[in-house]
Image (cartoon, rainbow, N blue to C red):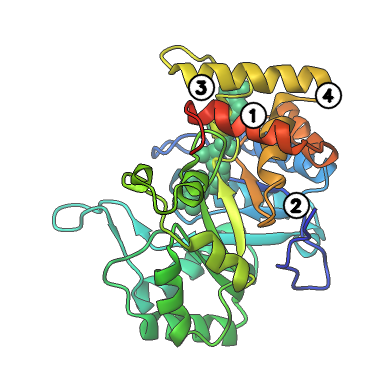
């Protein structure tokens, strides 16, 4: 299995990352409770127990509460911060009243202010990686590069990356940046397969409706940009979540996942993640469950080797139509 190239502090990066989006309860303005903090402790503990040392955040998750809960976990575990990687994101702004709609904002001022907010909520002096969350049509690469330079010089952020960006967008941004783009975090899972269909339908009419930006995976691989998969568990649809209202492909793929898990004596989560891990791009799944038992199930993925035939059977089941 390909190692993760993100290593910064002489510390290897775990193959799986824990996505912290659900910590802190809902995306409402309800206050954080002791139960939320307990949940944070249990999720982090379960993640550490399976070797995860990389934690993914964003300034907007549960409107800042996720980072606050994580900060509480750090506070009661002295020394933990130095044993883990912390990644967060900025650039999405929710509606802030009349004339301030939901928008993306890669302005220097917003990036700098966001990082101060992130550091304050997490209660740390620096984060390892800052990602730009979703492409801002108004982005000016020079302005972003200037913000990144200041953050690095101030010791607040050690490295930078992007999320949901195409190869073209990354190339444009890179022309201004001093440091290499380290990460692109995109949605990749067994039920969201445009990233594979795009490659197998080259020069075919079937590629007409494909949404995945051509050349993005290849660009990341050529430039050593770590591809991170968000929603790698397909929100649990292939590992036990009720399937009411789902189409036949989803139902059949969930059955195949269950069958393979049974055959290999492992969890369904492990099969779903092993399928992503088998891709030679060295994808790092950012698992979003905060259920300790499910987190531990995910930990089995690295012990599972799918054959090429098993990998294709899963892909074809999700596609629901033959390859060209
Ligand atoms: N960059 C971006 O634009 C972006 C967008 C979305 C997410 N992300 C990142 O990616 C991480 C993962 O994303 P995700 O949460 O969408 O993906 P995921 O890992 O595919 O799914 C996790 C979600 O599915 C639920 N789930 C899993 N198995 C289940 C089961 N058997 N039954 C019922 N529910 C089940 C989990 O609930 P439980 O906690 O109860 O298990 C959790 O809500 C996030 O935490 C975040 O860090 C990034």
Please tell me which residue is depicted at 47% across the width and 16% down the height of the picture. 248
Which residue in the structure is indicated by mark 3? 250
The mark nearer the N terminus, 4 or 3, is 3
Q: Position of residue 237 (x, y in %)?
A: 55, 24
The residues bearing labels 4 and 3 have C-alpha atoms spaced at a distance of: 21 Å
- Indicate whether 312 appears above or below 143: above
In the rendered structure, the answer to whether residue 116 lies left or right of residue 291 reads left
Q: Quadrant of residue 263?
A: top right
The residues bearing labels 2 and 4 have C-alpha atoms spaced at a distance of: 21 Å
Residue at disc 1, secondary structure: helix
Which residue in the structure is indicated by mark 1? 313
For label 1, the crowd category at 10 Å Cα-Cα, with few meaning under 14, some 14 to 19 and many 20 or more, is: some
The residues bearing labels 4 and 1 have C-alpha atoms spaced at a distance of: 15 Å
The mark nearer the N terminus, 2 or 3, is 2
Which residue in the structure is indicated by mark 2? 15
Q: Position of residue 13 (x, y in %)?
A: 77, 60
The residues bearing labels 3 and 1 have C-alpha atoms spaced at a distance of: 13 Å
Residue depth check, mark 2 versus mark 3: number of the one nearer the observer: 3
Q: Position of residue 44 (x, y in %)?
A: 73, 43
The mark nearer the N terminus, 2 or 4, is 2
The residues bearing labels 1 and 2 have C-alpha atoms spaced at a distance of: 24 Å
- Indicate whether 175 appears above or below 278: below
Of residue 26 and residue 245, the one placed in the foreground of this image is 245
Q: Quadrant of residue 49?
A: top right
For label 3, the crowd category at 10 Å Cα-Cα, with few meaning under 14, some 14 to 19 and many 20 or more, is: many
Which residue in the structure is indicated by mark 4? 264
Residue at disc 2, secondary structure: loop
Please tell me which residue is depicted at 83% across the width and 24% down the height of the picture. 264
């Amino acid at each position: 299995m390909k190692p993760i190239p993100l290593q910064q502090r002489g510390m290897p990066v775990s193959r799986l990352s824990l996505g912290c989006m659900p910590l802190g309860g809902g995306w409402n303005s309800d206050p954080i409770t002791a139960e939320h903090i307990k949940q944070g402790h249990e999720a982090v503990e379960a993640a550490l127990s399976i070797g995860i040392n990389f934690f993914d955040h964003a300034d907007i998750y549960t409107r800042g509460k996720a980072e606050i809960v994580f900060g509480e976990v750090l506070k009661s575990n002295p020394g933990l911060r130095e044993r883990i990687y912390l990644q967060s994101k900025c650039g999405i702004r929710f509606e802030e009243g009349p004339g301030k709609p939901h928008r993306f904002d890669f302005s220097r001022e917003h990036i700098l202010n966001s990082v101060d907010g992130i550091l304050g909520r997490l209660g740390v002096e620096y984060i390892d990686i800052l990602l730009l969350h979703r492409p801002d049509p108004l982005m000016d690469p020079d302005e972003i590069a200037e913000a990144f330079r200041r953050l690095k010089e101030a010791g607040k952020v050690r490295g930078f990356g992007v999320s949901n960006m195409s190869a073209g967008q990354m190339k444009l941004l890179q022309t201004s940046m001093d440091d290499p783009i380290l990460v692109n975090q995109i949605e990749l899972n067994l039920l969201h397969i445009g990233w594979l269909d795009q490659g197998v339908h080259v020069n075919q009419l079937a590629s007409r409706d494909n949404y995945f930006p051509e050349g993005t995976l290849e660009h990341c691989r050529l430039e050593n940009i770590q591809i991170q998969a968000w929603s790698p568990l397909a929100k649990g649809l292939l590992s036990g979540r009720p399937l009411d209202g789902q189409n036949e492909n989803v139902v059949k793929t969930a059955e195949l996942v269950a069958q393979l898990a049974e055959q290999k004596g492992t969890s369904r989560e492990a099969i779903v993640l092993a399928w992503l891990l088998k891709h030679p791009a060295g994808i790092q799944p950012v698992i979003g469950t905060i259920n300790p038992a499910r987190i531990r199930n995910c930990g089995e993925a690295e012990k599972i080797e799918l054959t090429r035939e098993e990998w294709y059977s899963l892909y074809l089941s999700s596609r629901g139509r033959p390859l060209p």
